[in-house]
């Protein structure tokens, strides 16, 4: 039995948090004692899970504002985490992203506790800083080859680097009637098709590019609807962009959702216009729903998407993305073939949660053995 700490920045709904919670459930099922700590969010179990503790890491991360303010919070958060490490007799810390890694590295000084960091993706200009943070850890994990190669190129020692996938727990298939009802609600009188994107409203996700894509596609397909599920700091801006581009009637900004499988079942195509990613869970979820995927070629996306299951496009290439979407809209036979290939790809062992989570358990044992 290992005593482990899983440490994301917070428990807001998102791919990182989904991974942490799924991995934790597997490890607890294997008999390990797993403590969760991080800032709040809709997925925080504080008060419901005795091993889920609040730690204000938002104050240290980019959410904390200007750098001097974030650094001012660092000693307190490290001291609070150090108390937790001692009280829970933690044997290994797994930090998810750089702010938790920095706090954990300070907190563990002199305690002999190994530190694992997972790199979930960042803007290319931050990769050197992420690699430098990774050098503080005993092991750095990336879910994609592209992610780990980027860090090694920026100075992360290869001996510390390992690629481990993302085991994505399956959810029950929604009822067809429920999906049809939701589809009608989102289309709101339009004919479709319905193009879904699971994207936070932030610079990374390229929502400005998506608005331009919507304008181009709407010219050829007036009934199209682009539905964007996710909240974020650019909510007011993206609505203004849609108005200015004349596509407010063709775009639906749904906010955060808790019914991802149902929304995927209601859609015809899946779209990702990101400027950077590592290995998006949302693409695999789209595959499982049988949706062809049109996505930008960033990070590890090319390890998921190719012409068999959709289209891979250049980052910020609104014209190319629009052309690829239109080609799929106009050829239902091609769309059906890619949908079948997407379902088949989702069955690959690299997405099986038990198989993937077992590799994390083995990696923890390796680090503890060293």
Image: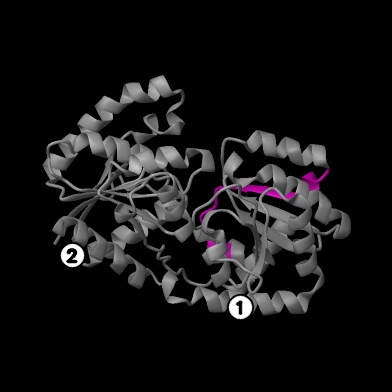
Badge 2 density bin: few <14, some 14–19, many ≥20, Cα 10 Å: few
Residue 153, x across and y down, in percent: 44, 48
Looking at the picture, tell me which residue is in the foreground, 119 or 49. 119
Q: Give the range drawn in magenta.
A: 246-262
Residue drawn where x is 81% and y is 49% of the image: 215
> In this rendering, is residue 310 above or below 68?
below
Q: Please name the residue shown 44% across and 40% down the image.
A: 128
> At which x and y percent is residue 30?
22, 67
Image quadrant where one finds the N terminus: bottom left
Apparent side of residue 84 relative to residue 135 in the rendered image (left or right): left
User: Where residue 175 sits in the image (x, y, percent)?
Assistant: 57, 73
Residue 222 in the image, given as x and y percentages of width and height: 86, 57
Disc 1 crowd, CA 10 A, few/some/many (<14, 14-19, 20+): some
Reading the image, the residue beneath label 2 is: 31
Q: Mark 1 points at which residue?
A: 341
Mark 1 or mark 2: name the one nearer the start of the chain.
2
Which type of secondary structure does the marked residue at label 1 adopt? helix
Residue 251 visible in the picture:
yes
């Amino acid at each position: 039995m290992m005593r482990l700490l899983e440490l994301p920045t917070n428990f807001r709904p998102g791919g990182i948090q989904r991974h942490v919670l799924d991995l934790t459930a597997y490890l607890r099922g294997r008999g390990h004692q797993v403590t969760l700590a991080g800032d709040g969010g809709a997925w925080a179990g504080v008060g419901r899970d005795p091993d889920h503790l609040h730690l204000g890491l938002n104050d240290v991360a980019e959410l904390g504002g200007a750098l001097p303010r974030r650094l001012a919070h660092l000693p307190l958060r490290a001291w609070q985490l150090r108390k937790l490490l001692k009280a829970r007799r933690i044997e290994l810390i797994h930090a998810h992203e750089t702010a938790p890694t920095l706090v954990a590295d300070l907190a563990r000084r002199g305690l002999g506790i190994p530190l694992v960091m997972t790199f979930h993706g960042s803007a290319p200009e931050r990769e050197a800083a992420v690699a430098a943070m990774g050098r503080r850890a005993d092991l750095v994990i990336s879910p994609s080859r592209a992610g780990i190669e980027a860090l090694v190129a920026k100075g992360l020692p290869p001996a510390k680097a390992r690629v481990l996938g993302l085991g994505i727990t399956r959810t029950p298939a929604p009822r067809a009637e429920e999906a049809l009802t939701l589809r009608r609600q989102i289309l709101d009188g339009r004919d479709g098709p319905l193009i879904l994107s699971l994207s936070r409203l932030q610079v990374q996700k390229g929502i400005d590019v998506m608005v331009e894509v919507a304008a181009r596609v709407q010219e050829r397909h007036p009934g199209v609807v682009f539905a964007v599920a996710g909240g974020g700091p650019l909510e007011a801006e993206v609505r203004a962009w849609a108005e200015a581009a004349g596509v407010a009637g063709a775009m639906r900004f749904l906010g955060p959702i808790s019914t991802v499988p149902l929304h995927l079942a209601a859609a015809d195509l899946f779209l990702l216009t990101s400027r950077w990613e590592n290995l998006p869970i949302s693409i695999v979820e789209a595959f499982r729903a049988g949706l062809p995927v049109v996505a930008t070629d960033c990070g590890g996306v090319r390890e998921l998407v190719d012409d068999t299951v959709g289209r891979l496009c250049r980052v910020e290439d609104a014209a190319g993305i629009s052309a690829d979407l239109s080609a799929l809209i106009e050829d239902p036979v091609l769309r059906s073939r890619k949908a079948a290939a997407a379902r088949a790809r989702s069955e690959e062992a690299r997405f099986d949660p038990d198989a993937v989570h077992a590799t994390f358990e083995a990696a923890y044992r390796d680090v503890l053995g060293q």
